[in-house]
Image (cartoon, grey):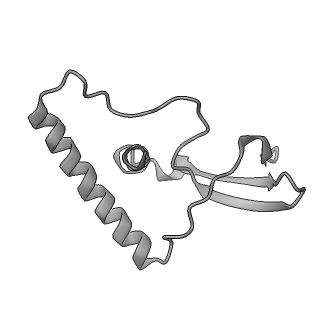
Amino acid sequence: MTICFIFDIIYTKKWEKNMIKFTYTKDNGDVSDRELVVLRAPSKSYFGIDVGDVEAETVKRLEIILAEQKADLDTFLADEELTSNYRSFLEKGVSFQQS
């Protein structure tokens, strides 16, 4: 799953489109305003790069590139003290204000 997260953020390079602001209501009724860099939108399916029919050398190169991207992201998150800021929000608790 981590590889898909990194692919979503780094490969597409659409940071501004991955930022959302919303009000979150927990099951216990607690409400908070949130701002999130979306790593993966709510989904019931797997998302990834299908390499089932790809040469092994190409797959190995892809794995190396993704590992390097993950290392860069891990370093950035550690430098900015964001390593424990991962959150998961149930879709049913998310509401957006009308503009």
Q: Residue furthest top?
A: 53
Along the line of sight, which residue is nearer the eye, 5 or 96? 5
Q: Classify residue 87 by image quadrant.
A: bottom right
Along the line of sight, which residue is nearer the eye, 2 or 12? 2
Q: Residue furthest left?
A: 57
Residue at x 20% of width, y 21% of height: 53
Q: Residue furthest right?
A: 29
Residue at x 82% of width, y 44% of height: 98
Q: Classify residue 33 by image quadrant.
A: bottom right
Residue at x 44% of width, y 48% of height: 5
72 left or right, relative to 65? right
15 left or right, relative to 13? right
Query: Residue 52: x percent and y percent?
Result: 25, 24
Query: Residue 39: x percent and y percent?
Result: 51, 49
Along the line of sight, which residue is nearer the eye, 98 or 79? 79
Q: Above or below — where is 42 with respect to 78?
A: above
Q: Above or below — where is 61 with respect to 68?
A: above
Q: Above or below — where is 66 with respect to 57?
A: below
Query: Residue 27: x percent and y percent?
Result: 84, 51
Circle count: 0
